[in-house]
Image: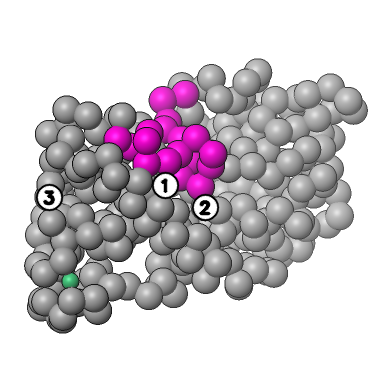
Amino acid sequence: METTRRGIEPFVGGARIARLVVRERRLRWPVPPGLEARVAGTRVVAVERRAKYLLLPLARGRAAAGTLLLHLGMSGSLRVVPATTPPQKHDHLDLVLAGGHCLRLRDPRRFGCLLLIEGDPRAHPLLCDLGPEPLGAEFDGALLATRARGRAVAVKSFLMDGAIVVGVGNIYANEALWRAGIDPRRAAGRVAPARCVALASAVQAVLREAIAKGGTTLRDFVQVDGATGYFRLELAVYDRAGAPGPRCGAPGRGARIGQRSSFFCTGCQR
Ligand SMILES: [Zn+2]
């Protein structure tokens, strides 16, 4: 989603919304009735992100006019196209901008959503229980160590829990644990504080690399949530069961942890 945010920001940030076109209201939550009238004529103040939610604070004149919250669900993608481009099947929403482009949502499985939040978006039920952003100032090894205390859950599941920290997907969790030398099956509460520091740094390094490598293909772009970042990241353990590890040469191993495919090095993760 960060790649998506960066991709659309040059087009959408500061732009005036000419109109909202809704072709299909039945998304994960229905597009609220009357939303078209409430957003028409507003200006997009900023293009922000919280976890996998895109947030567009709006203003009408100088007055705040709520925050559009957009989620891509499982299969959604956003692109910026000329508003005259004929919509295809599954192109459910167009946010038409005054300059003649539109931000178009395609979502074949309709698990995405578009809502308008009044007031502070951080207090909204979808956002208020989320842990900190991994690249934000609030996230560090001390926070991980505090939250891990006494927890018997596998450290990998812990790391992927959005109430602990948001945005650490399965591939990122596998790679970060390898970098930090931590066995993904280890109970979170049994990872020493110093190793939590190493883990937090590893998470941040993996995410920064993924963003840097996924963020190069913008312009008129199509992006299914985060996917390009994964494939360009150099993977040390993910999907490498049986292959010698790049650090110690011991074979990689696969396992299921919390229903998710997990990979680790049998030699250097403990
Ligand atoms: Zn190894």
Q: Position of residue 214 (x, y in %)?
A: 52, 68
* Depth check, front residue: 60 or 178: 178
* Depth check, front residue: 34 or 229: 229
Q: Nearer the viewer, mark 2 or mark 3?
A: 3
Give the residue pinned by disc 1.
167
Label 1 near ligand 1 (CB < 8 Å):
no
Give the residue pinned by disc 2.
1
- For the magenta stretch, what is the residue range? 128-145
**Element at label 3:** loop
Give the residue pinned by disc 3.
185
Q: Label 3 is placed on what type of residue? A: Arg
- The residue positioned 32% from the left and 51% from the top of the image is 199
**Element at label 2:** loop
Label 3 near ligand 1 (CB < 8 Å):
no
Vertical placement of residue 25 versus 201, above or below = above
Q: Label 2 is placed on what type of residue? A: Met
Q: Position of residue 121 (x, y in %)?
A: 59, 25
Q: CA distance from mark 1 to mark 2?
A: 9 Å
Q: Residues within 10 Å of mark 1 (few under 14, many from 20)?
A: many
Instruction: State the residue lying farthest toward the right.
Output: 61
**Element at label 1:** loop
Q: Quadrant of the C terminus?
A: bottom left
